[in-house]
Amino acid sequence: MLELRAIDKVYESRQGRVTAVEGVSLKLEKGEFCVLLGPSGAGKSTVLRVINGMTQATNGEVSFDGELVTRRNRRSIQNRIGTIHQQFFLVPRLSVLDNVLSGMLPKLGFLRSMLKLFASADRKRACELLGKVELKESQLYQKAGKLSGGQQQRVAIARAFIRNPDLVLADEPVASLDPSTSRGILRLLRGAAHETGATVLCSLHQVDLAHEFADRIVAMRQGKLVFDGKPSELDEAM
Ligand code: ADP
Ligand code: ADP
């Protein structure tokens, strides 16, 4: 469903040129839970940003369901992608429910006035999703900023799935959480993906978590792919 062909990304700044990603080619199949594994600085975030169009590759091509991503169709493809970040990026002063509904909107402008206009069907779906990520009904109208990190990330998962995305990109979603909370989050993310049929590409730096949750591991080091296979094959390769 997603294909990267020979992606390079070179950042240019006053400090000089940094080759963040070099020659990355990758095909994701529908419904796969793929972990992008690598240490900090390996280029994982850059790959995810190239896929969601936040940054442009220096060389190479991205296609989505066989369709080449171009400047012209980029927006419609972005609408089919949900994202989850290490820092959650909820709107702290909005309620949990409104944060999930905000996932329906392409931009955060006019958010408050728009949120009132959502149909009850959307609210129902948001509540259902929040139930699936195990938030209590009593938490739906709390301000998102009051929740713990693990709870905020569960809200962010619900937000990422509200538009029924074909692809969910998660950039180190558990890097700021403790190990047991991290496992809970990855379990919920995996469950949501399997239930909806969404493909997930999730970056991690912890090998043990990758082993535990991935259907497939793609490992990066210094901008390059160094492994692509089943978790059980990783140890022999590295
Ligand atoms: P990871 O997600 O694996 O930590 P990144 O994709 O964030 O890796 O970074 C890969 C390399 O690119 C690093 O050396 C990083 O410093 C550099 N880099 C990332 N973003 C930028 C940027 N906006 N400008 C310059 N260099 C960057
Ligand atoms: P990263 O995964 O490295 O955070 P993103 O693709 O999420 O990269 O976005 C690039 C930058 O834009 C981030 O480093 C972050 O500072 C900012 N950003 C992205 N999304 C949001 C958001 N919803 N609210 C505030 N800042 C954001």
Image: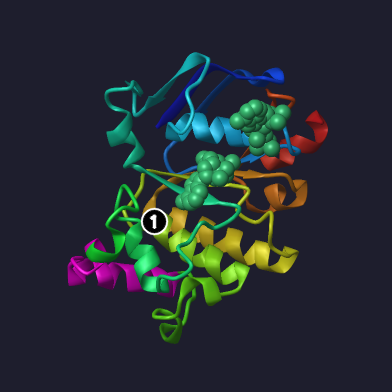
Residue that carries the numbered disc 1 in the rendered image: 161
Most distant residue in the front direction: 14
Quadrant in the picture for residue 7: top right
- 179 lies left or right of 228: right
Evaluate whether residue 219 shows in this view.
Answer: no
Residue at 79%, 29% in the rendered image: 237
SS state under label 1: helix
**Whether residue 194 is situated above or below residue 227 in the rendered picture:** below
**Whether residue 31 is situated above or below residue 141 in the rendered picture:** above
Residue 116: x and y in percent read 22, 69
> For the stretch drawn in magenta, what is the main secondary structure?
helix
Evaluate whether residue 140 shows in this view.
Answer: yes
Q: Is residue 154 magenta?
A: no
Residue 65: x and y in percent read 34, 29
Residue 35: x and y in percent read 61, 42
Residue at 55%, 63% in the rendered image: 153
- Where is ligand 1, by quadrant? top right
Q: Which residues are magenta?
A: 114-132
**Whether residue 156 is situated above or below residue 9 in the rendered picture:** below
Residue at 51%, 34% in the rendered image: 49
Query: Could you say which is closer to the camera, residue 66 or residue 140?
Result: 140
Query: Could you say which is closer to the camera, residue 99 or residue 37?
Result: 99
| Image quarter hosting the N terminus | top left
Callout 1 amino acid = Phe
Residue 18: x and y in percent read 69, 20
